[in-house]
C-alpha cells in the first residue's frame, strides 16, 4: 500500500483560504437576489485566485444562453471546461468562449452533440 506524504496530507486537510470578488454594476442591478458562487480550487497564490474569481465573474455575471452544437470530434473530456468554438452560425464566426455542460460523443460518426453555456 502506498502512503501519502505527511506534509501533503496536512495540506489537503487544511482549511480553505477565501477571496471575495464583486462587480458593483451587477450588485446594484441584482441586489440581494444576486447569485453567490463559491469555488474550491488548488490555487495557492492570492493574486492568481483573485484573477480566477474575476474570470468567473466576467463569464457568469451576465445573461447566459444554452446552445447545442453538433461538432466533429470528441468532447466528453471537455465537460466542465471552457473551450472556444468557431463555426459559421449563431454568431460563432469569430470564435466564442463557452462552458461545456454536456457532450455526447458518437465514435461511429465522429461527431459530438455538445451542450454549452455562453454569454449573450
Image (cartoon, rainbow, N blue to C red):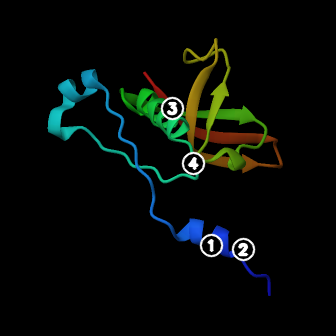
Q: CA distance from mark 2 to mark 1?
A: 6 Å
Q: Position of residue 56 (x, y in %)?
A: 46, 35
Q: Are marks 2 and 4 in contact (CB under 8 Å)?
A: no
Left/right placement of residue 21 relative to residue 89 reads left
- Image quarter hosting the N terminus: bottom right
The residue carrying mark 4 is: 44
Q: CA distance from mark 2 to mark 4?
A: 19 Å
The residue carrying mark 3 is: 51
Camera-near label (4 vs 3) is 4
Q: Are marks 1 and 4 in contact (CB under 8 Å)?
A: no
State which tag comes first along the sequence, 4 or 3.
4
Q: Are marks 1 and 3 in contact (CB under 8 Å)?
A: no
State which tag comes first along the sequence, 2 or 4.
2
> Which residue is pictured at 16% across the width and 39% down the height?
32
Disc 2, SS: loop
Q: Are marks 3 and 2 in contact (CB under 8 Å)?
A: no
Q: CA distance from mark 3 to mark 2?
A: 30 Å
State which tag comes first along the sequence, 1 or 4.
1
User: Of the numbered discs in the image, which one, if any, rests on residue 9?
Assistant: 1
State which tag comes first along the sequence, 1 or 3.
1
State which tag comes first along the sequence, 3 or 2.
2
> Which residue is pictured at 66% across the width and 68% down the height?
8
Q: Position of residue 4 (x, y in %)?
A: 71, 76
Disc 1, SS: helix
Amino acid at each position: 500500500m502506498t502512503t501519502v506524504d505527511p506534509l501533503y496530507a496536512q495540506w489537503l486537510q487544511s482549511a480553505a483560504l477565501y477571496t471575495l470578488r464583486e462587480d458593483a454594476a451587477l450588485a446594484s442591478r441584482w441586489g440581494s437576489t444576486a447569485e453567490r458562487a463559491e469555488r474550491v480550487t488548488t490555487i495557492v497564490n492570492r493574486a492568481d485566485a483573485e484573477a480566477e474569481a474575476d474570470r468567473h465573474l466576467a463569464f457568469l455575471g451576465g445573461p447566459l444562453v444554452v446552445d447545442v452544437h453538433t461538432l466533429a470530434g470528441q468532447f466528453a473530456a471537455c465537460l466542465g471546461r471552457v473551450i472556444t468554438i468557431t463555426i459559421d452560425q449563431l454568431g460563432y464566426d469569430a470564435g466564442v468562449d463557452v462552458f461545456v455542460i454536456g457532450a455526447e460523443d458518437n465514435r461511429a460518426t465522429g461527431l459530438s452533440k455538445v451542450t454549452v453555456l455562453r454569454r449573450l
